[in-house]
Image (cartoon, helix red, strand yellow):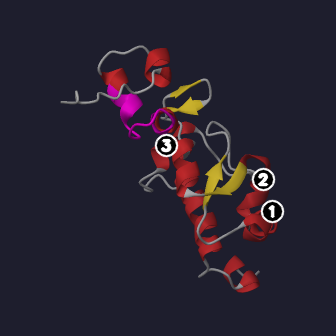
Amino acid sequence: MLSNQFRHRMSKTRIYKCWSNMKSRCYNVRDICYLIYGGRGIIVAAEWHDFKTFYNDMYQTYSADLTLDRIDNNKDYQKNNCRWATPKEQGSNRSTNITFKGETATQAGERLGGSRTLVHTRLNQGMSKERAFTQCIEIHKKPQR
């Protein structure tokens, strides 16, 4: 039987590398990201062990400037849980994000007119989660002479 490399001739393409890296994160204990993927029990759907199936499922929405993202970080890599996302979308979809009412701390900081670290700074200073996510920034104006 011929290997996948010879059947599809795509082993040097970016989409193939995305597929290969996905499998490595889930199954290669030497992969630097294994603990947060395979080590947490995240697997690749059986049908996606075949590159052609992954390609057929995901290529229509593929773009070279996007990365493979799991919509629900507690679920596996499978067709109904994956999408191609921008780096910003990826950052908003991390399992380590602090959220309040569906909004990440970074998104709230930007919405409130501050930096992306505003909410994290407030929480580290002991502010309640609700207040850190909802209180607008107070702008101090210098008194006029």
Counting from the top left corner in percent of width and height, residue 83 is at 70, 54
Q: Earlier in the sequence, mark 1 or mark 3?
A: 3
What number is the disc on residue 48? none
Callouts 1 and 2 close, C-beta under 8 Å: yes
Tag 1 secondary structure: helix
Q: Is residue 129 magenta?
A: no
- Image quadrant of residue 115? top left
Q: Residue at x 58, y 50 (%)?
A: 89
**What kind of residue is marked 3?**
Ile
Q: Left or right: 115 with respect to 96?
A: left
Q: Which residue is mark 1?
A: 57
What number is the disc on residue 79? 2
Callouts 1 and 3 close, C-beta under 8 Å: no
Nearest the camera: 85 or 136? 136
Nearest the camera: 23 or 109? 109
Q: Residue at x 47, y 52 (%)?
A: 29
Give me the C-alpha separation between circle 2 and circle 3: 20 Å
Q: Left or right: 125 with respect to 43?
A: left
Vertically, is 87 above or below 128?
Answer: below
Q: Quadrant of the N terminus?
A: bottom right
Q: Which residue is mark 3?
A: 36
Q: Are there few (<14), some (14-19), or many (20+) residues within 10 Å of tag 3?
A: few
**What kind of residue is marked 1?**
Asp
The magenta-colored residue range is: 109-121
Counting from the top left corner in percent of width and height, residue 137 is at 39, 27
**What kind of residue is marked 2?**
Lys
- Image quadrant of residue 31? bottom left
